[in-house]
Image: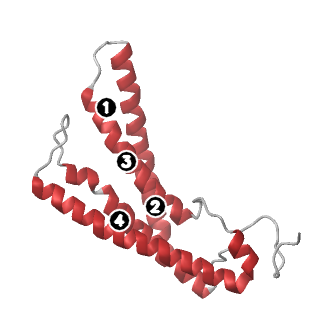
């Protein structure tokens, strides 16, 4: 499973970098066309909004997989190594359940309903279901990362608490 995670990490990293490069290009062109040419481009404006949504959602999934997301782990540090593992697993189950129910299930239903309605974006004339496809895709990635993290914590391959300073087993001293 760790080899699969490495491949997924690489693929998502390349995808995010490529989408971000196109996003920056769209924004630069939008600024140039608006202020230099006095003819703003509606296509790049809309495309930049859609790409920003994809980068944000897929980037959040990637960040979760790298364990670089914002986390307040004071409770886990105070609980000690064995209880900290259980708290890390509980937090992972909660995040995974949210991603599965809200992002994958709810996002998939949103995509299906939007595609069925035939809603198109104003400038690009893209089916909006494709734009909203970032939600279930990011949710699937988050669920996979949660499964990999939970398996690593259970097997002992991953330590849930990473800190620069060691905290005593009975908690921080005051």
Q: Residues within 10 Å of mark 3 (few under 14, many from 20)?
A: some
Provide the residue designation for mark 1. 45
Which residue is painted at 52% across and 75% down in the image?
Answer: 92
Provide the residue designation for mark 3. 53
Residue 103, image x and y in percent? 35, 65
Is disc 4 in contact with disc 3, using a CB cutoff of under 8 Å? no
Question: Which residue of the protein is positioned furthest toward the right in this rendering?
Answer: 174
Q: CA distance from mark 2 to mark 1?
A: 25 Å
In this view, the residue in front, 3 or 170, is: 170
Question: Which residue of the protein is positioned furthest toward the front in this rendering?
Answer: 174
Which residue is painted at 11% across and 58% down in the image?
Answer: 116
Residue 127 — which label? none
Q: CA distance from mark 4 to mark 3?
A: 14 Å
Dot 1 or dot 3: first in sequence order is 1
Q: Residues within 10 Å of mark 2 (few under 14, many from 20)?
A: many
Provide the residue designation for mark 2. 61
């Amino acid at each position: 499973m760790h080899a699969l995670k490495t491949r997924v990490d690489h693929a998502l990293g390349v995808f995010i970098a490529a989408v971000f490069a196109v996003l920056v290009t769209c924004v630069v062109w939008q600024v140039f066309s608006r202020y230099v040419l006095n003819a703003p481009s509606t296509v790049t404006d809309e495309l930049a909004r859609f790409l920003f949504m994809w980068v944000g959602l897929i980037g959040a999934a990637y960040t979760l997989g790298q364990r670089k997301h914002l986390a307040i782990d004071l409770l886990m540090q105070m609980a000690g190594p064995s209880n900290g593992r259980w708290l890390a697993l509980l937090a992972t189950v909660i995040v995974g359940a949210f991603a599965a129910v809200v992002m994958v299930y709810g996002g998939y239903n949103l995509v299906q309903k939007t595609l069925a309605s035939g809603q198109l974006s104003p400038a690009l004339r893209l089916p909006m279901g494709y734009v909203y496809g970032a939600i279930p895709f990011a949710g699937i990635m988050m669920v996979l990362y949660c499964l990999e993290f939970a398996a690593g914590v259970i097997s002992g391959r991953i330590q849930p608490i990473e800190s620069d300073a060691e905290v005593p087993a009975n908690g921080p001293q005051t």
